[in-house]
Amino acid sequence: MDPAQRIQRYKEDWSELERLLGALNHIRRPISAGDIDRLTALYKSAAAHLSAMRTQWPNDPTTTYLNHLVARAHHVLYKQSDKGAGSIGRFLGAYFPSLIRRRQPFILIAGALFLLGMIAGFAAVWTDPLSLHLVLPANIADAIDPAATNAPRGELHSPLVSTEILINNIRVAMLIFVSGVTLGIGTVYLLAYNGLIVGALAAVFVQAGESYVFWAYILPHGIIELTAIFIAGGAGLYMGYRFFVPGAYPRKRQFLRAAKESVQLLLGTIPLFVIAGIIEGYVTPSELPLGAKYAAAVGTLLLLALYYVYGRVRARSVPSNPSIR
């Protein structure tokens, strides 16, 4: 079939594809499923025509026309949906919770590793207070003073404090996640070690009779912060797991797929760290009653649970592939 015959036979399909592309580019309402289905069918057909034209008549004007038409259709199908706040909303509102559900065993293992480290740190300092200096870094161990917990803090400059805390927390999460390339060994160590520090600190405050105060200053931001760290840890553990258990795919391919999915998990934790950093910069050091801080902690726990349930429900009506690739 020469170019003239191809034009005569398929010009109506190509014209329809052009009209549909123009309509979708200027549309001010949600795109219907029928539009997407028709666009997909016409795009595949035009791509096949382009392939044939490139093989037989690469320099023909019809080939150039089809090349531009197919490129436009490809842009609409695979790029346009990636733009704007809508894609971020779909990612955080549906895909991220569904991804958490799929990787829930690894996230729970991350939390268990942190808890084991926490128990070990608490037990070590409870049985021998001098071991505090063996468990904690010197700068932290020397600065602990349970009696000064409720002391005035002066000018805190909360925005600056919040930003510094946010950067530090994201750095810790990224380190825990990236350690997954060590086949999960580094992730296991960092989760257990961070739990060890929290457990040792808790033991110091319990021995001083200030446990109520201690948890009032930890839980408001800690619930969200630790949830994000567990998710990042679960992402790192999943990468290590897929290296050892590749399944039906080649080891390298499965590891790379796991790494891509794990990066998406890590990206989803960033809003959680932002919220935790704001709470830690403004609420935690404030002069609010301790009961109000516990109420804030319960509120964050309920909000996390509601978000997860909402995401699970919404994910049932949204395609499983995220718009953020």
Image: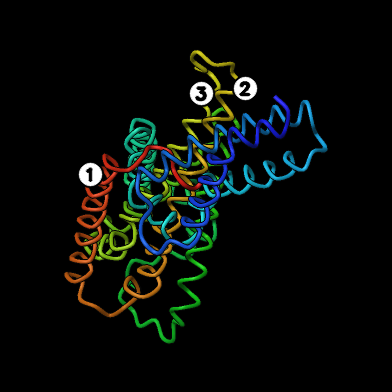
Say the numbered circle drawn on residue 253: none
Say the numbered circle drawn on residue 242: 3
Answer above or below: position of 97 versus 246. Answer: below
Label 2 secondary element? helix
At x 41%, y 86%, the residue is 154
Answer above or below: position of 105 versus 290. Answer: above
Label 1 secondary element? helix
* Of the pair 40 and 205, the residue shown nearer to us: 40
At x 43%, y 38%, the residue is 321
Is the image coloured rainbow, by chain, by secondary structure, or in one colour? Answer: rainbow
For marks 3 and 2, the one nearer the N-term is: 3
Q: CA distance from mark 2 to mark 1?
A: 34 Å
Q: CA distance from mark 3 to mark 2?
A: 9 Å
For marks 2 and 1, the one nearer the N-term is: 2
Question: Which residue is denoted by mark 1 in the rendering?
Answer: 313
Question: Which residue is denoted by mark 2 in the rendering?
Answer: 252
Q: Say which amino acid is labelled 2.
A: Lys
Q: Say which amino acid is labelled 1.
A: Val
Question: Residue at the right extreme?
Answer: 59
Label 1: how many residues lie within 10 Å, few (<14), some (14-19) or many (20+)?
some
Label 2: how many residues lie within 10 Å, few (<14), some (14-19) or many (20+)?
few
Answer above or below: position of 203 versus 6. Answer: below
* Of the pair 135 and 237, the residue shown nearer to us: 237
Using the rendered image of the protein, determine whether residue 123 is visible from the camera's viewpoint: no
On screen, residue 8 versus residue 80, left or right, reads: right
